[in-house]
Image (cartoon, helix red, strand yellow):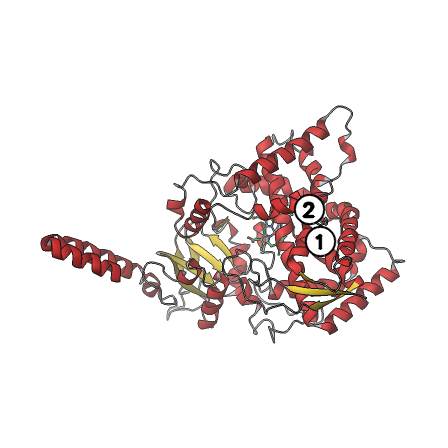
Amino acid sequence: MIVTGLLLAGLFYHNPLATVPVVAILGLLYWLVKYNYRFWEIDGVPFPKPSMLVGNLGPTLMLKKHISQLADGWYNAYPNATFVGYFKLFTPAIMVRDPELVKNILTRDFDYFATNDVVVDSAQDPLLVHDAFLATGERWKRSRALLTPSFTGAKIKQLFPTMNSVGDAFQAFVGQHVSKEVEAKEIAARFTTQNVVACTFGVDGDCFAESESEFRRMGKRVFQTSLPATIRLMLSFFLPSIAKWIPVPFLLNDVDQWIRSLVASHVQKRSGTGNDSSTHNDLLQSLLKNKEKHNISETELTGHALTIFLEGFETSSGVIGSALSMLANSPDVQEKLFQEIKKQIDANDGNLDYDVLQKIEYLDWVMLETLRMHPPAATMLKLSTKKYIMRRGERDSQGHDLGIYVREGTPILIPVLAIHMDPKYYPEPQKFDPERFSPDRKVEYRGTVFMPFGEGPRMCLGMRFGQAQVKLALLKLILNYRVNIGPNHKPFCVDPRSMVYQSKHGIRVVFEKR
Ligand code: HEM
């Protein structure tokens, strides 16, 4: 505003006549933007007051607040609303509050909301376009269909001996750091990276070595972007129509080259003469089995391997880190977990297999309660793909629902964390209480009130794998060590720069041998 005023003053000083059309155009633009911000008022939808030009996402755009914090504020400001309007810069967008409507959007009416609100371009990112999370339309259906057989319960059971030996190595690695303060998510990421690499390529990723392994280094690089790519990422969220004109890939060039040559070398080894591919039962082999049948190109195959690598370790390591901090803060829960794990392992003559892991109910509840309070995807962002009538549940005098038409391309926000922390569904929501997931306390609600893995046809594809690795890591650690909060730990404070919901201070813990 001040800059505009100074510019106008300068213009008036040099050429008073030219000021008239400039002021008129600026006035018209101002009026248009103001009028646009009346969109929800005209439809009678409650909405927080937008700021000029940035709408309601200013604090997120300025990296001051995580989008889940904004969603939390809107959720609590309109306790009786089925849905709330907001503005993504100029675009009218909707946050859905009502669990029944959430369920309809994610399941029954999925066809209207089949796309996630992120844009990748096949020319810029030929590998990432195959990522099931980022893909759209027919390409999404294909990616989902090709990856699904790799993540069934039977396949995870088959992979479990590999996971178990990675778990043993993890436990030994933590043993070298007892009584020292460590960052929980970082050590967990070493485990999940090592595990995903072992299960995908059947090799030792060397993630427990003193110096940083190549896989761990690339695991970090895969989430880094160049400055132009960061700008494109912000634009693709806020102004997607402009973002598509910026010819910059999201994936860094060295990561692109690295994953291509890694996959190519493994494929070549397995196709070499005398090499028996039936000896491999890893995830790459599951993909290779279908390569000819489904006409999968090298690029597409590499894209799927990249998906498994990047989706496979990051969210799970965050959940393991959060669970460790919860357990460190709740010694009673930690002790009970230890007793329950020990009871089941002892009953199986000291051996661990996939069925035993599945039997430890309390371990399940600890994981689920962690996911309730710290879901990595604290908000889910979807796009409406066709015109939809969104019902409000309120009726006019003639009994008609006061629903609204949602236009194609409307961003839809599902406030996962805000719903998980609503005392209406979870009494004393701030209390870490795993037993709220026990069958005798579980309450059925109409609609969806627990969705750390999403819901419906786009629900997390690697959920079973993720759950198995989170539970395995917790089992190995709690059976052998006591975890305490570290002296330099700072209370949880969400990192506004991060896509996933995580603390900007990290999670500092100390392990002690049992
Ligand atoms: C505990 C760990 C994990 C959590 C909390 C998690 C959570 C999620 C969530 C919330 C979504 C979006 C769902 C939606 O849009 O409705 C998602 C999608 C996805 N996840 Fe996970 N995830 C985890 C682990 C994994 C693992 C280990 C893999 C693979 C190895 C994986 C692969 C995927 C893929 C491919 C998608 C996209 C699915 C689609 O759009 O069709 N995830 N995950």
Residue 152 visible in the current orientation: no
Q: Residues within 10 Å of mark 2 (few under 14, many from 20)?
A: many
- 11 w.r.t. 295: above or below: below
The answer as to whether callout 2 falls within 8 Å of ligand 1 is yes
Residue kind at label 2, given as amino acid type: Val
The residue located at (88%, 61%) in the rendering is 347
Total numbered circles: 2
Q: Which x, y percent locates residue 28?
A: 21, 56
Side of 498 relative to 247 (left or right): right
- 431 w.r.t. 386: above or below: below
Q: Which x, y percent locates residue 218?
A: 61, 44
Side of 47 relative to 439 (left or right): left
Residue kind at label 1, given as amino acid type: Gln
Quarter location, residue 307? top right
The residue located at (37%, 71%) in the rendering is 397
- Which numbered disc, 1 or 2, marks the residue that appears first in the sequence? 2
Q: Residues within 10 Å of mark 1 (few under 14, many from 20)?
A: many
CB within 8 Å, label 1 to label 2: yes
Labelled disc at residue 196: 2
Q: Which x, y percent locates residue 265?
A: 67, 31
Labelled disc at residue 469: 1
Side of 444 relative to 3 (left or right): right
Regarding mark 1 in the picture, which secondary structure is present there? helix
The residue located at (57%, 50%) in the rendering is 458
Viewer-closest of 43 and 164? 164
The answer as to whether callout 1 falls within 8 Å of ligand 1 is yes
Residue 66 visible in the current orientation: yes
**Quadrant for the C terminus in the image:** bottom right
Q: Which x, y percent locates residue 264?
A: 64, 31
